[in-house]
Image: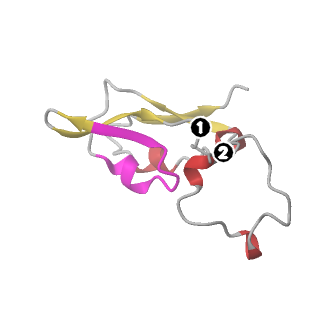
Amino acid sequence: MKKDENKKLSASEVASAGLVEAGTAQEFITGSWRSERPLWNKDKCIHCLTCWIYCPDSAISVEQGPKGTIVTGVDYNHCKGCGICAKECPDKIKALTMETERK
């Protein structure tokens, strides 16, 4: 049975110390937490995957392309706007930049 993504957990439903089971991140949409969002420029991206490696929320979308794994965008449902992806994108490339979130 799939969990309701919009349901907020009560204090008794959250595990001790705020910990939840591994692998549950896909079940919760957390993108509404951010105040900034990364913008991905596909024309500048060299698909080095540095953003994907460093993203703590696995919010960088990738897929297998004809020449290997390529970045395809940002999963805004799970991106919390930390900016690590934009900071780690190579200085000469800057395929990811941060902008203020528009609600």
Mark 2 is on which residue type?
A: Thr
Nearest to the observer: residue 81 or residue 23: 23
Q: Is residue 82 visible?
A: no
Q: Which residues are magenta?
A: 49-63
User: Residue 100 vs residue 88: left or right?
Assistant: right
**Which secondary structure, mark 1?**
loop
Picture mark count: 2
User: In front: 72, or 1?
Assistant: 1
Tags 2 and 1 in contact by the CB under 8 Å rule? yes
Image spot of residue 19 (x, y percent): 68, 70
Residue at 77% x, 65% y: name it.
14
Question: Helix, strand, or loop for circle 2?
Answer: loop
Locate the C terminus by quadrant.
Answer: top right
Disc number placed over residue 77 in the picture, else none: 1
What separation in Å lies between label 2 and label 1 (alpha carbons)? 6 Å
Horizontal side of residue 74 vs 17, given as left or right: left
The amino acid type, in three-letter code, at marker 1 is Asn
Mark identifier at residue 30: 2
Among the 4 quarters of the image, the one containing residue 102: top right
Decide: is 45 above or below 43: below
Please identify the quarter of the rendering in which residue 42 is found: top left
- In-front residue for pair 68/1: 1
Of pointers 2 and 1, the one earlier in the residue sequence: 2
Toward the right, the furthest residue is 11
Residue 47 appears in the rendering: yes
Colour scheme of the picture: secondary structure
